[in-house]
Amino acid sequence: MMEYTSVANPVWFDASHSMIVVDVVFPALSDTPVKFNASPKDSMAYGREIYADIIAGKYGAISG
């Protein structure tokens, strides 16, 4: 599983609310946040986990 240390600024990607764009820090890549599209259907477990945590309110309100 890809390690991430920060998740911020969630915004709905589309009107059907099927995906969320969020800033994520993946230490293996950089200390700089990157845009990440979180989805409940992501092929990677960490993508589904980030999406579920955002939906649960762990990272604040979802804009858009």
Image (tube, rainbow, N blue to C red):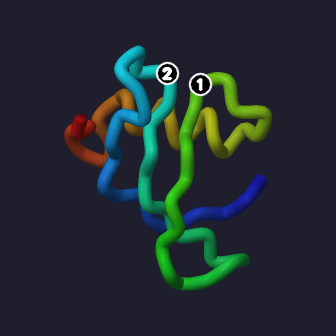
Q: Is residue 19 above or below residue 59?
A: above
Q: Are marks 2 and 1 in contact (CB under 8 Å)?
A: yes
Residue 37, position in %: x, y? 55, 44
For label 1, the SS is loop
Residue 21, position in %: x, y? 45, 45
Q: Is residue 25 left or right of residue 22?
A: right
Name the residue: 23% across, 44% down: 60
Residue 12, position in %: x, y? 36, 34
Residue behind mark 2: 18
Residue behind mark 1: 40
Residue 63, position in %: x, y? 22, 39
Answer few, some or many: residues within 10 Å of disc 1's Cα (few below 14, many 20 plus, some between 14 and 19).
some
In depth, the one of 60 and 64 nearer the eye is: 64
- Quadrant for the C terminus in the image: top left
State which tag comes first along the sequence, 2 or 1.
2
In depth, the one of 60 and 10 nearer the eye is: 10
Residue farthest to the bottom, as pictured: 31
Q: Amino acid at mark 2?
A: Ser
Name the residue: 54% across, 84% down: 31
